[in-house]
Each structure stands twice: as C-alpha cells, then as structure tokens.
Amino acid sequence: MGYASRKGATLLDRRLYLPESWFDADHQTLWQDCRIPDGTPFQTKHELAAQLVEGIMASGRLKARWVVCDEGYGDAPAFLQRLDATGLWYLAEVPRDTKVWPLLETDGQTERARPSSWVPPQTPSRKGPAPQRERLHPASPTKVPLEDLAKQWPSSAWQRFRLLEGHKGPLVADFLMLRAVLPLDRLPGPEVWVVIRRKVSGSAEEPEWKFYLSNAPIETPLATFVRVSGMRWPIETCFAECKGELGMDEYELRFWQGWHHHMTLVMLAHHFLVRWQQRLNQREGGPAPHDDTSLAHAS
C-alpha cells in the first residue's frame, strides 16, 4: 500500500499473500521450512488489502480522503464495502464487463427505472416451503455492461482533460460521469458514481477505455475524479523506483521473517529518499532551505 499527495509519494505497508493451496495438509513441511507462524489464517488478496487500509485509518497517523485501486481489487463488491465503512471515498477501477443499473438515459436528462428487490408471495407449493429470500423484482430494468453504456452516450456528454505531459506529448482523455446502482449479491446495492475515461489518440483504432466506481458524494465535480485517477501514477513510480534502485525484487530468501524484513528496509530506504528529494527540491532546480512545510507533509 502506498501514499500519495501533492508533496510526494512513498510506500506504507506490505502483506505476504499465501495461496489457498498452502493451507492443505501436504504443505505442512513447507510451512516449517519457511518458518511461517502457526495460526496464520488464509486471507484473500482483497481481505489483506482491506486490512491494510483499515489499519492505517484506525491509527489516525495519516490524513487521507481517497483510496484508489486497480481492477484486480475493484471487482470485489465486498472489498468496496469495507473501504466505504472506513469513511474514505474510493475510486476503484473495474473491468469493462462490470454490469450496473444506470439511472439516466443517454440524453442525460431522462431518469431510468430503478431496480428493486422483493420477497415473492408465500403460496403453497408441492415442491417445498415458500421462498423467503429477497429476489430482484421482475419489473426491474436490465443491468448494462459499462463498455456498452459508454458507447451509448453522445460526444456532447464527454469532457476533455489534459492529464500530464508524457515523452510523446500531452496525455489527453475524455471523461464521463453518471450515477448508477451497483449490484450486490444479485440485488440492488449502493448508488455510486461511474466514471469513464476514453483516451484520445489520432488513430482510428478502438478507443482505450478505463472504468471506475466511486462512493464519493453526489456533489463531487468531474475535475476531482480526473485528478484523483492520476494519483495512482505516483504509486506505480514508487514500485518502479523500489525495484530499479532499491532492490525490492532482488532477494534470495525463503523465510517468512526474512521477506518482511527485506520489504521493510526497502520501504524505509524509499521513504528516506523521498524526504531528501523534498529537501533538495531537485524538480525545481535547487534547494529550498526555508521550506520545511513540504517535508512535514511528505513524511
């Protein structure tokens, strides 16, 4: 897990994921050889990630408003629910085939029918007891894949933003935001923002899409989503720096404690270098001896 702000970015914490197969009886010898602590429970990557966020927020040592993640985590509704419970606003990338119930037609003005749930009437049946579990109401509209939804909206509904200056020129993308209901266990779940990014290119190829879900307040402007979506890039830079300069991926060990020790030292080294980068103010061309505020925020 990383932390990014306008003052810099660094890594905060780590967890070692153990595949479910490692909890089979035939892996007990490997557990002993790797000195994995007894009683370590199986946890999915989503559960580990949620614990990292919850732990940081519970400590109260860092100020944060947003949490962002790629589609490997955004595709788990239970994970998003845990993020929502922390009080953070999430912007989670999701796969293009994610289905939602949109709340507006493509004219941007006509509201669609909202999905609802119900318990079917209890009627005698020879097949067994009457159903008690909530189901999707038969009159509910059909869910729509995000990619299909993006293609339905007219060009006038999109807004263009310049994201950053790349090696080949500025990176420009069109953005669209709309309200939708997220399915949860096949039933209508929370109402969320859907944010869609369409990369602008000069070629006639199929556009490059990115899709996000967010629990941010309804008054959140599109420009805020655009800014927050770009805060993932500093975290990717952290991993690149840690691997390329600090040896994050260069270790030869097989012990549980050794892995955690190595990753801890890498993160501390990166944190140290980020502080020095702020102190030297290299990106501005020289030191800033009187600017101690940026150091405090960067740490």
Image (cartoon, helix red, strand yellow):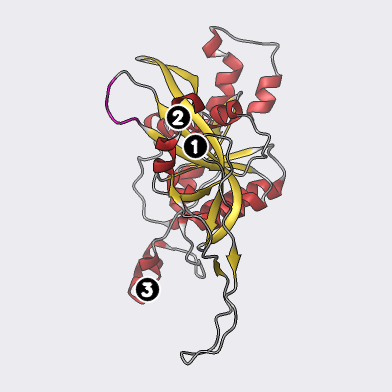
Q: Choose between 170 and 232: the one closer to the eye.
A: 170
Per the rendered image, the range of residues in magenta is: 203-207
State which mark lies toward you, 2 or 3.
2
Residue at the image position 60 percent from the left and 24 percent from the top: 6
Q: Amino acid at mark 1?
A: Thr
Using residue 292 as the reference point, say whether residue 41 is left or right of it: left
Residue at the image position 59 percent from the left and 25 percent from the top: 223
Question: Percent from the top left, x then y, of residue 206?
Answer: 30, 31
Q: CA distance from mark 2 to mark 3?
A: 53 Å
The answer to whether residue 12 of the structure is visible from this angle is no
**SS type, badge 2:** loop
Q: Choose between 71 and 43: the one closer to the eye.
A: 71
Res. 106 mark: 1
Question: Percent from the top left, x then y, of residue 108?
Answer: 55, 34
Q: Quadrant of residue 210?
A: top left
Res. 119 mark: none
Residue density around tag 2, few if under 14, some if 14–19, many if 20 or more, within 10 Å: few
Residue density around tag 1, few if under 14, some if 14–19, many if 20 or more, within 10 Å: some
Residue at the image position 39 percent from the left and 44 percent from the top: 96
Q: In the rendered structure, are the residues bearing label 2 and label 1 in contact, judged by CB atoms less than 8 Å apart?
A: yes
The answer to whether residue 72 of the structure is visible from this angle is yes
Looking at the image, is mark 2 or mark 1 earlier in the sequence? Answer: 1
Q: Quadrant of residue 51?
A: bottom right
Q: The C terminus lies in which quarter of the figure?
A: top right
In the image, residue 205 lies in the stretch drawn in magenta: yes
**SS type, badge 3:** loop
Name the main secondary structure of what is drawn in magenta.
loop
Q: Choose between 72 and 43: the one closer to the eye.
A: 72
Q: Choose between 286 and 76: the one closer to the eye.
A: 76
In the image, residue 214 lies in the stretch drawn in magenta: no
Residue at which label 2 appears: 154
Residue at which label 3 appears: 24
